[in-house]
């Protein structure tokens, strides 16, 4: 019998990544989509188009699962609220299974990323871990006593919305908070910090990039930093320290064995993570700070997609 195949879809704040994945977690076909506009119908249409494109290449899939950047009610499969996509109050699972005609499962994107990293990735064999997904925003997943922890209504573990600065900047998207970790340390925050340094230093490589392009993204800053640019490295280090500030609270509150850093911004690697580790070493409480390992995701930016595929292979949340 050929191995079962499913479709895993990871919906980020600015783009979607989907793939056909088999039981050995081999990815056979990938699609990328950017969100157009901000309309709910258009957003749902993009989900359907992406899945249909994948099914055209692999019609034999058993099920589809989605990791959403949203608070997801497990029992109903509804998206209760989302910072970045217009998915508030959408009965996502029912709607998608009706449109796609296959079993559909749905969970928060960082919860499924935690699942993939726990089962086959960086946190394999661990019982207490946290997942921090750095992208447009910051997603969070928690593994407590060997199980994904979701809170009373399934909408917890929003680690990106832990407040790290009472007087901090307004949070992103629809979050009513200020000074959330997401506002201080997401991929977008890397871009904003790089732009701030570029404006201060017009003669630097960052400054010239800003003058030429009018905008610096987190990806651009990361690329320059890997090429050795000191100003771009400084931007990453500044954001890494903000990230570390949030991780101090996580370490003190939960005493995890491991914090896995994933999402697109993990491309910055140790240039971002080392300053975060340093802050945890200096400010978190012993012995928790001495136990915790802070590591990049084994599956890089694909843990969300692979975790969604695992959810589909599992037939939903256990
Ligand atoms: Zn927030």
Image (cartoon, helix red, strand yellow):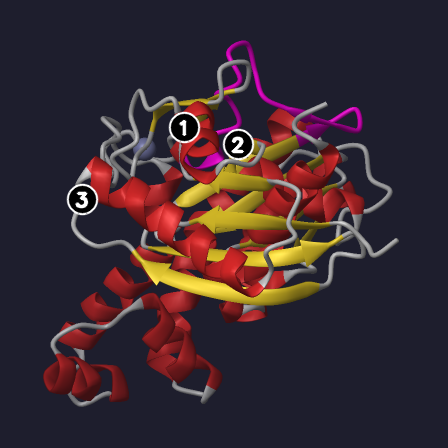
Q: Earlier in the sequence, mark 1 or mark 3?
A: 3
Residue stretch in magenta? 143-160
- Quadrant of the rendered structure where residue 28 is? bottom right
Cα separation, mark 1 vs mark 3, equals 17 Å
Quarter of image, ligand 1: top left
72 to 8, vertically: above or below: above
In the depicted view, which residue is nearer to us: 129 or 293?
129
Q: Specify the label residue 315 is tagged with.
A: none
Q: Furthest-top residue in view?
A: 152
Which residue has dot 2 on it? 106
**Secondary structure mostly taken by the magenta-highlighted segment of the chain:** loop
**Where does the image place residue 3, in percent across and percent down from the top left?**
81, 54
Circles 2, 1 touching at the beta carbon (< 8 Å): yes
In magenta segment, residue 159:
yes
Horizontal relation, residue 110 to residue 195: left or right:
right
Along the polypeptide, which appears first: circle 2 or circle 1?
1
Query: Badge 1 is on which residue?
Result: 92
């Amino acid at each position: 019998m050929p191995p079962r195949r499913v479709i895993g879809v990871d919906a980020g704040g600015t783009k979607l990544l989907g793939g056909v994945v088999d039981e050995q977690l081999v990815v056979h076909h990938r699609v990328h989509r950017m969100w157009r506009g901000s309309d709910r119908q258009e957003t749902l249409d993009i989900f359907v188009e992406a899945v249909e494109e994948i099914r055209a290449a692999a019609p034999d899939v058993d099920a589809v699962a989605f990791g959403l950047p949203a608070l997801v009610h497990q029992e109903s499969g509804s998206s209760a609220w989302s910072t970045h996509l217009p998915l508030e109050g959408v009965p996502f699972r029912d709607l998608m299974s009706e449109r796609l005609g296959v079993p559909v499962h749905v969970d928060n994107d960082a919860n499924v990323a935690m699942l993939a990293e726990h089962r086959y990735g960086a946190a394999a064999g661990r019982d207490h871990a946290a997942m921090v997904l750095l992208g447009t925003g910051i997603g969070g997943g928690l593994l407590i006593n060997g199980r994904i922890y979701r809170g009373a209504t399934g909408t917890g573990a929003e680690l990106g919305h832990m407040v790290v600065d009472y007087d901090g900047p307004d949070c992103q998207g629809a979050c009513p908070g200020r000074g959330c970790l997401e506002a201080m340390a997401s991929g977008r925050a890397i871009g904003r910090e790089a732009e701030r340094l570029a404006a201060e230093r017009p003669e630097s490589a960052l400054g010239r990039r800003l003058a030429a392009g009018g905008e610096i993204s987190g990806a651009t800053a990361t690329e320059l930093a890997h090429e050795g640019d000191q100003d771009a490295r400084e931007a990453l280090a500044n954001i890494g320290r903000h990230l570390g500030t949030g991780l101090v609270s996580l370490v003190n509150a939960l005493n995890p064995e491991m914090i896995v850093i994933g999402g697109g911004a993990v491309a910055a690697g140790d240039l971002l993570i080392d300053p975060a580790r340093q802050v945890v070493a200096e400010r978190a409480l012993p012995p928790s700070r001495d136990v915790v390992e802070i590591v990049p995701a084994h599956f890089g930016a694909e843990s969300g997609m692979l975790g969604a595929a695992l959810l589909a292979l599992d037939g939903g949340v256990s």
